[in-house]
Amino acid sequence: MAYRRLTHETSRLLKKKLPAAFTVRVRSAQKLDPQYQALCSLEGSGKQRYFLIRISKRLSDEQARDALIHEYAHAVSWGHLHDQQEDHPWHDDVWGVNYARVYRVANEDEEDSFHEK
């Protein structure tokens, strides 16, 4: 399923510069629970495991990109404790550090152009 160009470009950049332990797949989702903008999950089994990020089609391009950055931080954090404990907090310190890293990489071009002015 195709998804927005901005989200696609950001996804490619993140996969290249911050690879996760598992392959990351990003999909747009039409039937996502309205309380969520995006969801992530570890799918498959064995060597076929992958991290699936589903982003609501209801979001604007910028909102979808922001949701991708948030969920990609989970993908990079996965393996820390998330896959071992059901009750582990999803937004712990490790996730916070990874969110900062993902945000920085996703916005490098904007920061570079800002500093050039």
Image (cartoon, rainbow, N blue to C red):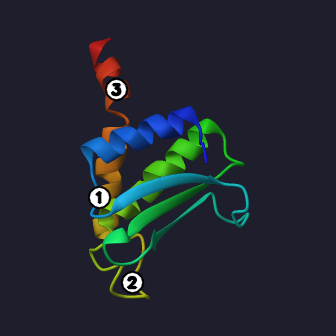
Q: Amino acid at mark 2?
A: His
Element marked by disc 3:
helix
x and y, in percent, of residue 49 in the image: 38, 70
Element marked by disc 1:
loop
Front residue (pair 115, 31): 31
**Disc assigned to residue 109:** 3
Element marked by disc 2:
loop
Give the residue displayed 34% in from the left and 18% down from the top: 113
Looking at the image, tell me whether mark 2 or mark 1 is earlier in sequence order.
1
Q: Is residue 89 visible?
A: yes
**Disc assigned to residue 88:** 2
Give the residue displayed 35% in from the left and 59% down from the top: 23
Disc 3 from disc 1: Cα separation: 21 Å
Q: Which residue is mark 1?
A: 20
State left or right for residue 82 relative to residue 54. Answer: left
Give the residue displayed 49% in from the left and 39% down from the top: 8
- Up/down of 46 relative to 77, above or below: below
Looking at the image, tell me whether mark 3 or mark 2 is earlier in sequence order.
2
x and y, in percent, of residue 93 in the image: 30, 68
